[in-house]
Structures are given as structure tokens and as C-alpha cells.
Image (cartoon, helix red, strand yellow):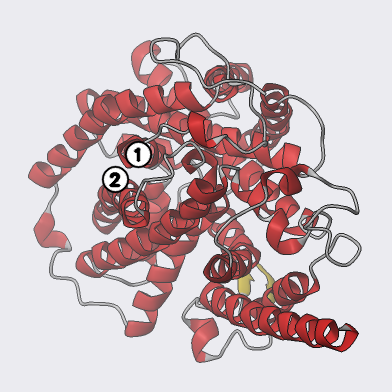
Amino acid sequence: MSTAPKEGTILSRVEQRGIEPVPEDQRNGSPGQLFWVWFAANISILGIPLGATLIAQGLNLWQAVLATTIGAFGSFALVGIISIAGRRGGAPTLTLSRAIFGVRGNAGPTLVALLSRLGWETVNTMTGAFALLSLIAIIFGTSADARRSPFLTFVCIAVFVALTVVVSAAGHAFILTVQKWATWIFGALTLLVAIYLATTVDWSSFIGNAPGSASAFLIGVGTIAAGTGIGWVNSGADMARYQKTSVKSGSLVLTAAAGAGIPLVVVIGLGSVLTAGNSTIASAADPVAAVRSALPAWVSIPYLIAAFAGLLMSNNLSVYSAGLTTITLGIRIPRAYAVVVDVVVTTCGALYFTLGSDGFYGPFVTFISLLAVPLSTWAGIFLSDMIFRKRYDSDGLLNLRADSPYWYWHGINLPAIISWLVGIVVGFLFVTAQVSKDEVWFSGPLADSFLGRNGLAWLVSLLLGGILYAILHVLSKDSMAVRSSGDD
């Protein structure tokens, strides 16, 4: 088993550890490190379309900011809670999930988690290419239209992917260093753009807009939660597995919530301000170009640099987690190679959507809304299990044979799998998958109910999955206790 890199070598060592738990004597992380990780990962231009969506849903600016604060801080608090399991077990999130679902049953949640990561990485890569195209257009006068410049688009995607591979393949220690410096440098550039908008935007044109309905506000909170923390819940333990066992649980929750919440409120707020002053941004196929056109060149350049870097920081963390998830799924390759496999898939997806897609916001919001249901159900079950479980068997997490302590019934823990499937089915009853005003993929029979109309399907799934698992878990334990006493 590999040893942890020493101070001073973090930029020259590639992390060799895969999904095997980190020994306690090699865990020297602190909550402050995770603050920078989550901060840098969320200085992303993808907050712009989320902010645009809030305004498009009928919220005024103040409601949009409040919905963002509740959705972002609240959903990343869940990420922080799940990171506590990483401190306890020293393993990646989906590897720890084997203890709950069984070494075979965990394949379902792991596959969904991998699809989530690949989807986000495709969006990151595509949008990163847009940012670089726009930057080149300003400097060299080329076209910022991806379809008019397919070769240049390919080059931009290749640059983004290459930088992602360098950081993600290097591993945990390198990511910690890069994310910390990125927070300071690119956070400052984002702040520059925010100050410019605050001092130049025509506040009088929208500051007094009538508030949207309570229903629209609830939908806004749900949209932000699904588009931010819910998408990261299955990665909470991936970085926290290197935390000292003495680190307090509250510190992990606070660093995740504040580290991600602060930049998200700023960036999503920018999207809301820009959309409130320019309604065409909400329907733009290229969000980067739409925002760039609303800014003077001297502000556009730092904005685009910060946008590109923010997407890269988010992608670094996502690809790192995706590599661990790929190994957990059963693909036996070194972690660095798993990173390469994942970026090949997302590169192909980015090329397709960048050069062939007619829209951005509709598919993006629909994508996160659909994935929010199985991810939320899994999160509810995982959180519920944390109440009962205080430790994880390190050897058992890696043992996929019938003698594993997490083999359960043919490798499947029925209470967890049943709860997950029921939570997903019930959650989708409340979902409307609507890409645009005229294009609806499907609508559940309860989509017109209060919960459905207010975009709370993810919350239904989270609560139902967690509560049902707790009940079935207790009943199964009681049943085993009865059988054991009968045998005696």
C-alpha cells in the first residue's frame, strides 16, 4: 500500500492510492483544506444559467438571492454531513456505500453516480470551450461561434481536457494545492466582475420588480439545491477520507456549506442580475457569449479567464471523484487511468453537444432535475445509515466475495435496495421533465400536486428513502435477533 506524500512533494507525486481506505496514521488533513476545495470548485460560470433560471421562473432579484442562499448552503451541508463518513471510514463515498447496499447491490447507485459525474463533466468541458472560444475571439478577432469554427472548438476542448487530466490524475495532494491558489486568484477576478456590475447595472430597471409566487420560490430553492449540492453528495467523502480522525463533525459540515455556498451566492447572483437586466440571456444557446456581450472588453477578459478557470477547478474535482467511482464499479485499472477513461467519454459528449446542440438551459436544468431523484434517494439512505453505523470494515469494503461482511443476501442488502428503488419510483411520480415550453419528455401522474408543482420531488425521494431504509433496517435486525434466539 502506498504511503502519503510528504510536505514539499505534493506537486511532484502522483497519488497511487485507489479506493482502498486510508490508514489512520496517514490521515493528516484539516477542514480548512476542504474549504478551499469546495470554494474553488464552485467559482463556476454554470451558476450563471442557474441564476437566469430563477429570474425566468418569475422571482425578483431578492427572492433569487434568498433561494440561492438556502439551496446552496443547505444542499452542501448535506455534502458536509456525508463527508463525516469519509473521516470515519477513510474511503471514497461510493466505496463506503458498499457497506450499505452490499458489494453487488452497490452497483446501481454507483452507476448513477458515475453518470452524474460524466454528465456534469460534459457540461463543464463544453462550457469551458465556450469560455476559451470567447476569449480568443476578443484577443484575435476570430468567431466565437463553435459551429463556425469547429477546428478551433476542438482545440479549446482539447486544452480544457488536457489541463483536467494533469490535475485530476495527479491526485488528492495536488488538487488541494491547486484549489487553494485558484480560490484566491480567480475568486478575485470574479469579484472584479461583481463590483463592475454592482456599479454600472441599471438597478432601477428591475430592483423594484414584484416578487414571484411562493410556489416559484420553492421551485427556485429546489432548482438550486439540485443544481449544486445534490450533484456533489456522492463525492463528499472522496476528499474527506484524508481528514484526521480527530476533526470535529461540525467543522466538516461548516466548511462544505460555507466553502461552496459563498461563491455560489456570488456567481448565481451575477446570473440573476444579468438576466434581470437582459432577458435574452435566459434563452441563449451559448451562456458565455451572452454574458460576454453584456460586458465591455476590459471586464470580459477577466470574466472569461475566471469562467474558464472556475469550470476547470470544478472539473478537476469531478473527474477525480469519477475515477474513484469507476474503480468502485468494478473496473480494475489504476486510478490515474480511470481518470483518462472518464475524460475520453466526456470529451466525446462535449464535442457532440457543442457542435450539434441547439439549446443549453433546457437540457441542463432537466438533466440535473432528473438525476436529483436517484441521487437524493441514495443520500437519504446513506444519511440514515450513518445514524446506525459508527465504523466501517476496511478489509470488508474491498472484499467482493461471499465471505465479505457486506455480502448480505447474494451480495445485496435488501433493505437498502428496496428503499432506493421505491424512493426513485415515487420521486419520479412528482417530476415533469420539460426541456422547453413545447418539449416535455414525460410528466409523472403527481406532477401537478403541490410537491410536484414546487419542484420538491428530490426532497420526497430523500426523506422517503431515508425513512423507509431506517424502518426496514430495524425490522431486519429484529428478525435476525428473533431467529438467533430461536436457534439458541
Report the residue at 19% width, 41% height from top.
Answer: 194
On residue 43, the disc is: 1
The answer to which image quadrant residue 347 occupies is top right
Does 413 sit left or right of 382 as displayed? right
Residue 235, horizontal then vertical, whole percent = 55, 47
Report the residue at 42% width, 54% height from top.
Answer: 80
Q: Secondary structure at mark 1?
A: loop
Does 354 sit left or right of 24 as displayed? right
- The vertical placement of 55 against 249, above or below, is below
- Number of marks in the rendered image: 2
Report the residue at 60% width, 43% height from top.
Answer: 92
- The vertical placement of 401 against 459, above or below, is above
The amino acid sitting under disc 2 is Pro
Crowd tier of the residue under label 1, counting other residues whose Cα lies within 10 Å: few below 14, some 14–19, many 20 or above? many
Q: Nearer the viewer, residue 205 or 318?
A: 318
Crowd tier of the residue under label 2, counting other residues whose Cα lies within 10 Å: few below 14, some 14–19, many 20 or above? many
In what quadrant of the picture does the C terminus appear? bottom right
The answer to which image quadrant residue 416 occupies is bottom right
Q: Is residue 181 visible?
A: yes
Q: What residue is pinned by disc 2?
A: 263
Does 332 sit left or right of 426 as displayed? right
Residue 475, horizontal then vertical, whole percent = 72, 86
Mark 2 vs 1: CB contact within 8 A: yes
